[in-house]
Amino acid sequence: MRGKKLGGVLLAAAVAAAGLWGLTCLLVPKYTGRVVEGNFTAEYYREESPHDVLILGDCEAYENISPVTLWREYGITSYIRGNAQQLMSQSYYLLKDALREEKPETVILSISAMQQAEQSNETYNRMTLDGMRWSREKLEAILASRMEGEHLIEYVFPLLRFHSRWAELGGEDLTWFADRPLVTHSGYYMRADVRPAGTFPAERRRSNYEFEEKAYEYLDRIRELCEEEGIALILFKAPSLYPVWYDQWDMQIEEYAKAYGLAYLNALEEIDVIGIDFSEDTYDGGLHMNVYGAEKVSRWLGPVLQKQFGVPDRRGDAALSAVWEAKAARYDAEKQSQEEEFARLGYLTRFSGDETGASD
Amino acid sequence: MLLVSYEFLFFLAVLLALYYLLPGRFQWPLLLAASVLFYLSGGAFAIVFLITTTVTTWFLALRLEAMTERAAARVKELGLSGGEKRAFQAAVKQKKKRVLIAGLILNFGLLAVLKYTNFFLGNVDVLFFGGSGEGPYVDWLLPLGISYYTFQATGYLIDVYHKKIHAQKNLARYALFVSFFPQIVQGPISRFDELAAQLTESRRFDWLTIRLGLMRMLWGFFKKLVAADRIAPAVAVIVQNPDQYQGIYVWIGMFAYMLQMFADFTGGIDIVIGAAQLFGIRLPENFNRPFSSRSLAEFWRRWHMTLMRWLREYIFFPVSTSRASQKLSGAARRFLGKGAGRRAPLYFASVTVWLITGIWHGASWNFVAWGLANCAVLLISQECSPLYRRFCSRFAWTASRGYAAFEVARTYLVFCMIEMFEYYSFDVVFSMFGSMFFGIRPWQFSGELAASLGLSAADWIVVGLSALLMFAVGLAQRDGRSVRERIFALPGWQRFFVIYGLFLAVLVLGVYGQGYDASQFIYNQF
C-alpha cells in the first residue's frame, strides 16, 4: 500500500515535471524569424571540431568576420562567440565557458563593447545568456550583467520569464519545440543584401570619454585569463562607420594594448587596405558589413593571424577539412539564396520589416 | 516585499523550513523576527511608527489593567459597598477613560497626520488660496499597513479598557500580534483574543495544514495575477477617461472595476490567510461571498468583514449609546416624535461609521461622498423595509429563485454605482448614470475605442473564464463547505489535475515577471 502511494507520488511528480518542461519548450522564443540572434550562444555547443581562433564580442564581431572565408582561404579554424550588445563581462564568461570545451591559440576580442559596461535592454541579456549551458560561468555571467528587475530564478526557469507568450504562439513554436535550426555560420550572421552607407547624425560630444571601470575590469580579466592559458589576445575594432568610434576611445585602447603588449587591430584605419566599398559592402548603411564586406575583412585578417600570430593552416587535416567543407557548402548555399532573393526583390523577405533585427 | 513577488515566496519557504525545524519555544520569536524583517524590507523609517503604536498601546493597556486591579483591591481593602463603591469605581473609570483617550488620540493622531495632512492642506488651499495646487504639500510615505495595525492595536486597547481581555505583559509577544507579517499589509484586522494565543503556540509539522495553506495561497495568486491584474489596464483606461468612455463603456468599466477589486482584495486576503495557515495560524475570514448578497446591508456584512466588525464594535455601539446620542435622541423625540427619537442614535452612529469608513478608504471628499452614499442607501432601505416586507408577503413570486437572483443583481448594481463616487464628482457620476441607461449603443464596443482598452481578445477570454471560475467557486461555497477540503477529498488523480491545472493557470496566464510593475494590491494603500 505504502509502495503504491509512493509510486503514485513519483508518477505525479514526473507528470508535473514533464508538463513544465513541455510548456517551457513551447513558450520560450525560438528566434527563427527576423530576429535570430537568440540562437547564437547555444549553437556553439553543436560544433564538431575545435578552433584555433575564438572571436568574442557584440555585433561588430558576429557581422564583420567570416570564419568560412578564413578557412577557405587560409585554413584557419575559427568561431565567433558573439551576441547582440554582448557586454565585456559576458564575453569573459563565454570565453571561460568555451575554455571548458577547447583551448584556442588566439582570441580576437571586439572592443566596441567597452563603451557600454551595463546592459541597456533585458532582451539582449536573455539572447546572450539563455543559450549558455548551465555552469558556474553562466551563473556568474547572469549575476554580472543582470539589470534591475531581472531575477536569477527567471533564468533558472525560463517559463517564468516567457510565460506571457501564450497569447502570441505561432507555427514556429511547434516546429522548433525542442530543437533549433542553425542560423549562423560558425557564429557569423550572414547578410547578402546591400544598403549603401548614407549620412550619419553629427558626432555627439560626450561629457566623459573614459571607459567605465567595470568594462576595464572585464577586459583585465579576459587578458589575465588568456595569459594564464597561454592564448594570444588581439583587440579588434570593426570597420563600422556608426556609431562613432571616438579618438579618445581609440587612444585608451591603444594605451591599454601598449601597456600589456597586446595587438590592437583597428580596421577602421585600414578601410582602404581592406578595400571596403561602403556602397557595396554594408547591408544597413554602414553600421555593419554584409557578407561581401565581412569576406574582405576576413581576407585582411587571415594573413595577419598567420604571419603575426602563427595561426596554422589546417587544410591538410582530412577530418577538419570534411567538417569545414560541409560548413562552406551550407554557407555558399545560403549566400546564393540570399543573393538571388535580393536580386529579385531588392530586399530579403526574412529580414524585412520596420526593424532590421536585433543587431546592436 | 510584495506578497506577489519571488522574494516573498523565497522568504516564506525559508521561514517555513526554519519554523518547523526549531523547537517550539523558538517558533514565535522567529515569527516576530520575520515580521520585523518583512516590515523593514518596505523601508526602515516606517518601523518607527509601528514601534510607537506597539509600545504605546502595550504600555497603556498594562496601565489600564493595573488601574482596574488596584481599584478592585482598594474596594476590597476599604470594604466599600453600595454608593461609595459606585462612586469610587466611577472615579477610577474616569481615570481609565483618560488613559484610553490618550492612547487613542496618540495613535489615531499619528494615522491622521500621516494619512490626511495633504487632504487637510488641500482643503485649506481651496478655502483660502483659491485651490492653486501650489500649497505646502508634504510628500510623506504612508507607513506600510498603518491603517490596519492602528485599528488592530487600538481595538486591543479598548478591549482591555472594557476588561474583555487581559493585557499582554510580554512586549515581544504583543509586538508579534501587532506586526504579524502576512496580515500587516492588508488585514484582516484581528482581535487579540482570536489571534494572540495562536501566534505563540508551539507547533509540529502537519502536512494537511500546510497543503490547505498552499492551496489557499494558490487560489489567491490566481485571483490576483490572472484576473485582477489582467483586467487592470482596461479599468485604468476607462476610469481615467470618463468623458471618452460613455454608454456601454460605463457598464463595462463598472463590472471590470468590480471584478478587479474583488479579485485583487479577496485574492490578497487568500494569500495572507493561506500564508498564516502554513504556520498553523487561523486568521479571521474577511469575505463571505459578498456578491451573493440580496441587499446592501447584507453585502456589508459579507465584505471586508473584519473592518466592519471593528467599526461596529468600536464605533457604532459606543457612539449609539453615547451621551451625545442620548441627547440627540431626546431632542428628536421632543421635536419630531417618538419614532424619530428612537432612530436618532442609530442614524447618528451610522453616519459616523460611514464617514469613518469613507475617509479610511481614501483621503478625499470622494470617499466621504462614497461613504455617505452607502449610508444613505442603507438607511433608506431600513426605513422602507416594513413596506418591502409587506410587498414580498403579498406577491408569492418574490420567494422564487428568479427574484432572489434579481435581488443579487440589484445589490451588485447598487454597490457598483456607489463605487463611482470614489473617483468622480457628483456631476460626472450623474452624467454617467444617464449615459449608462440612455446612451447605450451596442456597436460602441468595437473599433478603436475598444482596442484602446489595452486588452486583446485572448485577454478578455482569460478574464471571462477567470470570472466564471470565481463565480463557480462562490456557488460551491453556498453550503458553507470548504472547496479546498472537497478538492482534497477527490480521488488522487482528479485532485492532482485540479491543483496542477490551477498552478499552471497561474504560472502561464498570470500577469507577472519582466514588464510587470509589481502592481500594488488596491487595499495595500490604506
Image (cartoon, rainbow, N blue to C red):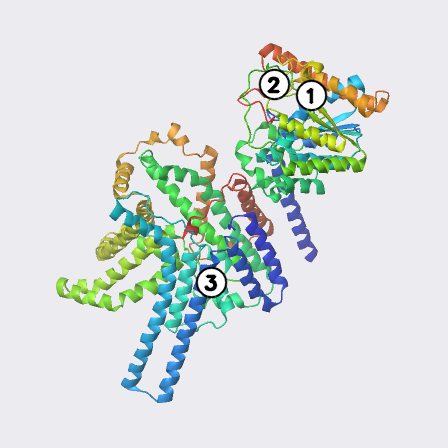
Q: Check if mark 2 and mark 1 are on a common chain.
A: yes
Secondary element under disc 3, as helix, strand or loop, is: helix
Evaluate if marks 2 and 1 touch, with contact meaning CB atoms under 8 Å apart. Answer: no
State the residue position of label 1. A267
**Host chain of mark 1:** A
Query: Of circles 2 and 1, which is in front?
Result: 1
Q: Residues within 10 Å of mark 1 (few under 14, many from 20)?
A: some
- Between B157 and B460, which is closer to the camera in this rendering? B157
State the residue position of label 3. B51
Q: Residues within 10 Å of mark 2 (few under 14, many from 20)?
A: many
**Host chain of mark 3:** B
How far apart in space, not on screen, are marks 2 and 1 (Cα)? 14 Å
* Vertical side of B244 occupied by B166: above or below: below
Q: Which mark is residue A286?
A: 2
- Between B438 and A132, which is closer to the camera in this rendering? A132
- Between A135 and B289, which is closer to the camera in this rendering? A135
* Vertical side of B210 occupied by A235: above or below: above
Q: Is residue A26 visible?
A: yes
How far apart in space, not on screen, are marks 1 and 3 (Cα)? 65 Å
Residue drawn at x 78%, y 21% as measured from the top left? A304
Q: Which mark is residue B399?
A: none
Answer with left or right where residue A60 lies relative to residue B169.
Answer: right
Answer with left or right where residue B115 lies relative to residue B382.
Answer: right
Residue A96 position in % (x across, y down): 74, 37
* Amino acid type at image mark 2: Gly
* Amino acid type at image mark 3: Ile
Farthest residue toward the left?
B335
Q: Quadrant of residue A193?
A: top right
Residue B39 position in % (x across, y down): 50, 56
